[in-house]
Amino acid sequence: MSYVDEIYARVVEQNPGEKEFHQAVKEVLDSLKLVIDANEEEYRKISLLERLVEPERIISFRVPWVDDNGKVQVNKGYRVQFNSAIGPYKGGLRFHPSVNQSILKFLGFEQIFKNSLTGLPIGGGKGGANFDPKGKSDREVMAFCQSFMTELSKYIGADQDVPAGDIGVGGREIGFMYGQYKRLTGQYEGVLTGKGLTWGGSLVRTQATGYGLVYIVDEMLKHVGKSLEGQTVVVSGSGNVAIYATEKAQQLGAKVVALSDSNGYVYDPEGIKLDIVKEIKEVRRGRIKEYADEVPSAKYTEGTGIWSIPCDIALPCATQNELNLEDAKTLKANGCFLVAEGANMPSTREATDFYLENGIMFMPGKAANAGGVATSALEMCQNSMRLSWSFDEVDQKLKNIMADIYAKTADAAERYGVPGNFVAGANIAGFEKVADAMKAQGIV
Ligand code: NDP
Ligand code: 2IT
């Protein structure tokens, strides 16, 4: 058995039932095969892959809090500190009822390679809780965040582990957690990113994941002599990533015709009116259905099915495994020629293979959505220097980082004889730097 197959079998055996983690490991290992085979003896000698797939540490803890009815609620909290070879652990916190150890391990594993691709000194981590912020009062969210941080604060620090937002964690939650960290430790430090602009946050961080996604799409299009101008785009989700991907795509001349949430999707052939979406999602914390109540040209459909809307470009920006083989076939049949992932692992493995085998240009999440964490690293940098850069300065750095990620990804794919396969390219380019650092740092 090859080294990578051995390691995959080991991961399945030693992490029973963790299907999302298995899926993420398999995708990475499959595309690293060429690199690993070329260096097999060296890597086996230091058990590089055995170490790479085992988190340095997983912290799991009880999160008790009191709801508005005076009832004590208990959630499960986690932080997966996966790999610190190239910098302090860095990655978001997800608050969603589906959160479990498998999902956080898959996200933490992906984060290692994503963070490496940014070119910035950040290791891989992820955390969160099976808490559902939906329908909770601000006071309940604060009580939860304070309790969560009371435990998490023991394990994080500006040079140790720097969490940020993800699904269900935005500016409000980061604020409550930052306040509690400061109160517990007495430290005003860059321990979280995605902070507010008056208390250490970076301009562009709110927009960064969505903008970065569209910057890399623009880069992909430029290399085939096309542009976003006049392209029809479908974006799934209607959260942080989806909203700012839509904003940038529209600024660059594309027409975004659909958005969704976990209940259903809206189709607006005249083009999504983003100010209305922002009011519904960012101010009222409402449902995407409300868009169709307000906009006569829009139609709301309950359920999944957003990928049946004809488009040139598809940007899945909601959650893992939201786009399967059937969806990929439908996209292709309707003329879609490019898919780029704003979410983490939104395409199933079968869908990914279909893109690659059927000439759909495809940029996987760990490259396409790296603009968020890259701008988080720029926030850390500004915090350390105790100064703030302007919007244009950060935006320009983000553009350069996304262009650099495209170049590294395309180059690695070329070097290993699979030009245009950005899945292999991103995994290989991300891996090379981490493997080199792990080799240099000895058996740790
Ligand atoms: P938000 O919480 O702001 O928005 C999430 C969106 O996805 C909502 O519209 C939500 O709908 C929908 N969604 C979430 N879970 C499901 C589900 N199980 N089924 C269907 N729809 C779902 O999160 P973000 O926009 O920050 O994150 C979206 C994706 O982008 C995630 O995969 C995240 O890991 C990834 N990402 C985020 C980054 C960031 O900087 N925020 C950086 C890089 C990647 P509803 O409101 O109904 O739940
Ligand atoms: O998946 C991700 O890259 C994020 N949720 C952002 C992480 C971060 O530290 O900004």
Image: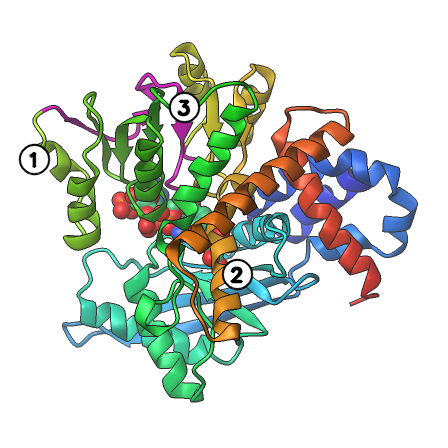
Left or right, 11 with reference to 41: left
Task: Using the image, determine if residue 1 lies above or below residue 432.
Answer: above
Q: Is residue 173 above or below residue 159?
A: above
To which residue does mark 1 refer? Answer: 294
Amino acid type, mark 1: Glu
Residue visible at 50% across and 36% down in the picture? 216
Is residue 254 placed above or below 97 in the rendered structure? above
Q: Position of residue 318 (x, y in %)?
A: 37, 41
Residue 443, image x, y percentages: 82, 66
Q: Which portion, as a residue range, is magenta?
A: 297-322
Amino acid under disc 3: Ile
Q: Nearer the viewer, residue 32 or 392?
A: 392
Quarter of the picture holding the N terminus: top right
Residue 316 on the magenta segment: yes
Find numbered disc 1 in the image and state the secondary structure of the residue it sits on. helix
Query: Does any portion of residue 325 appear in the rendered image?
Result: no
Count residues near mark 1 (Cα–Cα under 10 Å), then give few for <14, some for 14-19, many for 20+: few
For marks 2 and 3, the one nearer the N-term is 3
